[in-house]
Image (cartoon, rainbow, N blue to C red):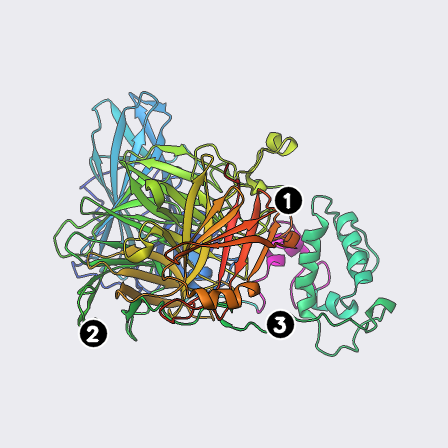
């Protein structure tokens, strides 16, 4: 919100109605003394969702002077004295809020000269403003824009903003402009948003300088307890805060007053819900409360849930209702305690066939968003944190992690959750943009952040992540998650929940749709693209999905109004990943390169932790297969995977407080390398016309197999997508093995099973005391096979 203090009208140099600016600046605006700039904030230039605007660049010139650009519009948004409240997932682990500016603006609302226009012989021409990136050199920033006219002719504009202290003690805000590719008959101007008649003509080497009297120190606003609550969003998008505050009565009662008067009972929630929908007066005075017919009951209940957080802890306060009496609740019989890790419970250690090396340390604790290798062997790590950084690690392929050298080469990126190196060039996927990073002066630090593509739709919702990044056949591939904090009257933007194919010129092709939170895409078997999706609304369990053009993957929030009337049929996943058992927040899939597992796939999981192994086969033109536990033993939830030039698998880990983590751990960078040791486990499960074939990594002990085979558990069940969050196993039933065959070499067993059904998950739990001919025990006994089709 803008404040209009009268002191801001006391400029030393006022801009007239029409001002031509060039190198001949008014002598009343003296150039300040030249001095090296020292930026007090790190990073001082950063992308974020600021003030609920999705594509913002904030510049902290010093500790109190800020400017922000709305890059979606290609214009200067705000110049102010104060600061930025850095709230949100990467700053404070809060989900439903984003950074906000605070303090006093230097320009009154609408008085900034920030609207780009072009004139042709005095006639105004409509232009489209495109943001093209910025260059950051020697602590100075230059923004690049392109003004595109209807005839496709364009003009390039460079803008370099800066704050300085002038010799007379005034505060100076200066904007330097450089115009390229402009024909002589065209004139570039900037006008005010509130008054298009007030404009400035920008010459090829233009400059605007404004002087302001010093502003008193601004105080950062306090953030109320409980701010991170979904009920706040519904109230902010309604008119609740017009009449109510948390602690103090305004037009209406405070939330504390309401929560004190009414206890949180079903009767009172119903009563208050009706009051909010229909409006009324009399309880708190004669001032009527506006009706809110557009709010849905579930939204109102969330609002009331937040209101009741202000209830005093003394339970005797407030009126009592019959339904608030304590009720006896029947105890639910808990599931049996799992036997041990890998046998009904998650693994705990590192896979025996691999050795683990820890690469993070006390001074480098990355929440990893992306991994990629440079041609010279350095590992690039992007971080999902307040820095939004990219680090180059030298020496990771060596034997001693203490000798690894770490250099930060980029910063200020908005949630960089994907990265690729193509022909030595670095590309990073930000929340709102695919960006190419360029080092112009050869010092290893990236100077230019060049826009490759920012053509997909975004809002201020925290959950609109951009995941990836994969490069294949001259194209980039990314996935976009859906918003999670929309009102019932709002719709998902058209690109949300999709896989996008992006060419190097920035053009976009939409591939599939109906994804919820597809955190990770990779190249898998047969050189095909696969991605994972997270359980939630319309997803009864997690998924491994084969990317196919035109496929609908089941998340109905992204359907158009027309499609909602006749929903398309959802394509089944290649593998279901049952929630809490083998998946919770699956992440990037990758093809295996070594050992007996070569040609299979791996994928990580942030909340379930560790790495899972995926065996896929193609039946009747469709991928399906089994998922196995593979390895735990990592510091945090696994988010990104990349193979190194040394043959090791590099594992990037991440987490946050409040549900998206493994054992609440938030960072980690490690590698595992195949050591050649054999581990006894299921290698694959293949569907047959009358059952399954299970192959092992070691030959079975026939006597032991005969003794324990009757302990094998096999079940099948199906899932059904509904509007609910997640879903149960439906039609769960035990399966009996009609015939049990062992191959001559003891490496395979064939199970003849009747009553198998397509579009079901078949769960296998082998006897925990099953042994190989070498006397080795199983590493893990469980597998989940997704039987989309039964082969002929």
- The residue under the point 73% across, 44% down is 293
Residue annotated with mark 2: 402
Q: How many marks?
A: 3
Q: Residue furthest right?
A: 322
Residue annotated with mark 3: 336
**Of labels 3 and 2, the one closer to you:** 3
Query: SS for tag 3?
Result: loop
Q: Name the one closer to the observer, 644 or 613.
A: 613
Residue 143: image location, x then y, percent: 27, 45
Q: Is residue 219 visible?
A: no
The image quadrant of residue 603 is: bottom left
- The residue under the point 26% across, 30% down is 155
Residue 317: image location, x then y, percent: 78, 76
Magenta-drawn segment? 225-253
Q: Residues within 10 Å of mark 1 (few under 14, many from 20)?
A: few
Magenta span main SS: loop
Residue annotated with mark 1: 488
Q: Name the one closer to the observer, 6 or 569.
A: 569
**Of labels 2 and 1, the one closer to you:** 2
Q: Name the one closer to the observer, 138 or 718.
A: 718
Query: SS for tag 2?
Result: helix
Above or below residue 401? Residue 100 is above
């Amino acid at each position: 919100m803008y404040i209009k203090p009268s002191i801001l009208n006391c400029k030393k140099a006022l801009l007239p109605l029409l001002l031509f600016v060039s190198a001949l600046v008014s002598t009343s605006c003296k150039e300040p003394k030249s001095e090296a700039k020292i930026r007090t904030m790190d990073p001082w230039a950063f992308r974020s969702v600021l003030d609920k605007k999705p594509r913002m660049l904030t510049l902290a010139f010093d500790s109190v002077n800020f400017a922000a650009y709305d890059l979606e519009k290609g214009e200067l948004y705000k110049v102010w004295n104060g600061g930025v409240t850095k709230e949100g997932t990467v700053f404070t682990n809060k989900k439903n809020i984003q950074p906000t500016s605070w303090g006093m603006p230097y320009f009154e609302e609408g008085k900034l000269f920030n609207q780009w226009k072009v004139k042709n012989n005095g006639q105004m021409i409509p232009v489209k403003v495109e943001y093209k990136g910025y260059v950051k050199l020697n602590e100075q920033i230059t923004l690049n824009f392109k003004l595109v006219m209807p005839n496709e002719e364009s003009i390039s504009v460079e803008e370099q903003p800066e704050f300085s202290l002038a010799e007379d003690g005034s505060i100076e805000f200066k904007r330097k402009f450089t115009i390229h590719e402009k024909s002589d008959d065209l004139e570039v101007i900037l006008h005010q948003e509130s008054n298009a008649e007030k404009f400035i003509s920008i010459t090829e080497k233009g400059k605007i300088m404004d002087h302001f009297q010093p502003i008193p120190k601004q105080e950062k606003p306090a953030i109320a307890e409980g701010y991170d609550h979904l009920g706040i969003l519904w109230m902010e998008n309604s008119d609740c805060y017009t009449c109510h505050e948390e602690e103090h009565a305004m037009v209406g009662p405070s939330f504390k007053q309401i929560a004190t008067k009414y206890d949180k009972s079903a009767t009172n929630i119903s009563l208050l819900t009706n009051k909010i929908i229909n409006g009324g007066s009399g309880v708190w005075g004669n001032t009527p409360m506006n009706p809110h017919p557009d709010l849905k009951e579930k939204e109102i209940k969330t609002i009331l849930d937040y209101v009741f957080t202000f209830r005093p802890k003394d339970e005797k306060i407030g009126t009592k209702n019959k339904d608030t009496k304590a009720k006896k609740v029947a105890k639910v019989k808990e599931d049996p305690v799992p036997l041990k890790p890998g046998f009904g419970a998650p693994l705990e250690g590192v896979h025996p066939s691999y050795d683990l090396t820890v690469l993070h340390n006390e001074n480098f604790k990355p929440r990893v968003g992306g991994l990629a290798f440079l041609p010279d062997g350095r590992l690039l790590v992007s971080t999902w944190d307040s820095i939004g950084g990219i680090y180059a690690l030298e020496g990771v392929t060596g034997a001693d992690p203490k000798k690894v050298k770490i250099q930060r080469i980029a910063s200020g990126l908005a949630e960089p959750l994907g990265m690729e190196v193509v022909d030595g060039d670095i590309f990073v996927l930000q929340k709102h943009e695919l960006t190419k990073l360029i080092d112009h002066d050869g010092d290893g630090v990236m100077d230019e952040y060049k826009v490759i593509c920012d053509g997909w739709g975004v809002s201020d919702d925290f959950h609109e992540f951009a995941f990836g990044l994969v490069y294949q056949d001259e194209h980039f591939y990314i996935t976009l998650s859906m918003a999670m904090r929309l009102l019932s009257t709002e719709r998902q933007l058209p690109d949300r929940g999709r896989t996008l194919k992006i060419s190097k010129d920035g053009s976009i092709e939409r591939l599939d749709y109906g994804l919820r939170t597809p955190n990770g895409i990779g190249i898998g078997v047969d050189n095909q693209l696969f991605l994972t999706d997270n359980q939630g609304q319309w997803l009864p369990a997690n998924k491994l999905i084969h990317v196919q053009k035109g496929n609908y993957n089941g998340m109905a929030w992204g359907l158009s109004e027309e499609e909602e009337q006749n929903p398309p049929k959802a394509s089944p996943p290649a593998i279901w990943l049952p929630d809490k058992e083998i998946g919770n927040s699956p992440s990037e899939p990758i093809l295996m390169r070594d050992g007996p597992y070569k040609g299979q796939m791996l994928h990580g999981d942030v909340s379930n932790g560790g790495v899972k192994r995926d065996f896929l086969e193609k039946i009747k033109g469709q991928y399906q297969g089994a998922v196995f536990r593979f390895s735990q033993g990592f510091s945090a939830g696994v988010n990104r995977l990349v193979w190194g030039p040394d043959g090791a698998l590099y594992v990037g880990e991440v987490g946050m407080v409040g549900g998206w983590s493994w054992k609440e751990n938030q960072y980690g960078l490690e590698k595992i390398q195949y050591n050649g040791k054999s581990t006894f486990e299921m290698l694959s499960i293949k569907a047959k016309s009358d059952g399954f074939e299970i192959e092992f990594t070691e030959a079975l002990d026939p006597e032991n197999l005969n003794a324990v085979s009757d302990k094998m558990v096999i079940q099948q069940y199906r899932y059904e997508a509904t509007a609910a969050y997640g879903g149960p196993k439906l039609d769960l039933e035990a399966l009996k093995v009609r015939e049990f065959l062992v191959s001559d070499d003891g490496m395979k067993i064939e199970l003849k099973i009747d009553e198998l059904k397509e579009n079901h998950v078949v769960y296998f739990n082998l006897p925990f005391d099953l042994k190989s001919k070498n006397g080795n025990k199983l590493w893990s006994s469980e597998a989940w096979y997704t039987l989309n089709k039964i082969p002929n």
